[in-house]
Each structure stands twice: as C-alpha cells, then as structure tokens.
Amino acid sequence: SYVVFQKLPQESVVERLKYRFVLFSQNDLPIAQGSLKENVVAELAIPFKKGFLIPNIDLNAAFYYEFDK
C-alpha cells in the first residue's frame, strides 16, 4: 500500500499548509482518505508499521497515522 498527499489551496501566504491524503492498496484501489489537521511537512512522511509518520513543521516531533487494512 502507499499514500498520496495533496496540498490544498491556501487563502493567503501566511495561512498554514493543509493536506489531504488517500491511502491506496497494492491493487491501486483507495482504502482510506482524510485530511491532516496538524501543521506538518507532508513531503517528509515515511511509512511506519500500519500507517505513516509525518513530522511537524518545526521538525521536533512527529504524528503517527495508523490504518486498519
């Protein structure tokens, strides 16, 4: 499986970045989707166990998103 992130449009340049994600199966079928509520750097997300780790904007912590597959 793999995750695709989409950066959502910003209202202004000072607004934080918002992302949407879609988790796909090995057969390229969507399994789960959602939006990232935290202020993160989606380009640095890495697969981990049954989900992915994604660092916050300050790069001093990470959030873990887990999925039931």
Image (cartoon, helix red, strand yellow):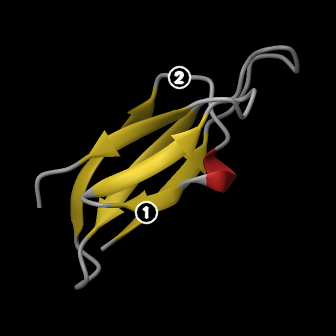
Which residue sits at x=73%, y=25%? 10
Amino acid at the residue labelled 2: Glu
In the image, which disc is placed on residue 27? none
Q: Marks 1 and 2: which is nearer the front?
A: 1
Q: Secondary structure at mark 2?
A: loop
In the image, which disc is placed on residue 38? 2
At which x and y percent is residue 41?
67, 41
Q: How many tags in the picture? A: 2
Residue tagged by mark 1? 47
Left or right of 32 on screen, residue 35: right
Left or right of 39 on screen, residue 57: right
At which x and y percent is residue 57?
72, 29
Left or right of 64 on screen, residue 43: right
Q: Which quadrant holds the N terminus?
A: bottom left
Left or right of 24 on screen, residue 58: right
Image height of 20 relative to 14, above or below:
below
Image height of 42 relative to 69, above or below:
above
Extreme bottom residue here? Answer: 27
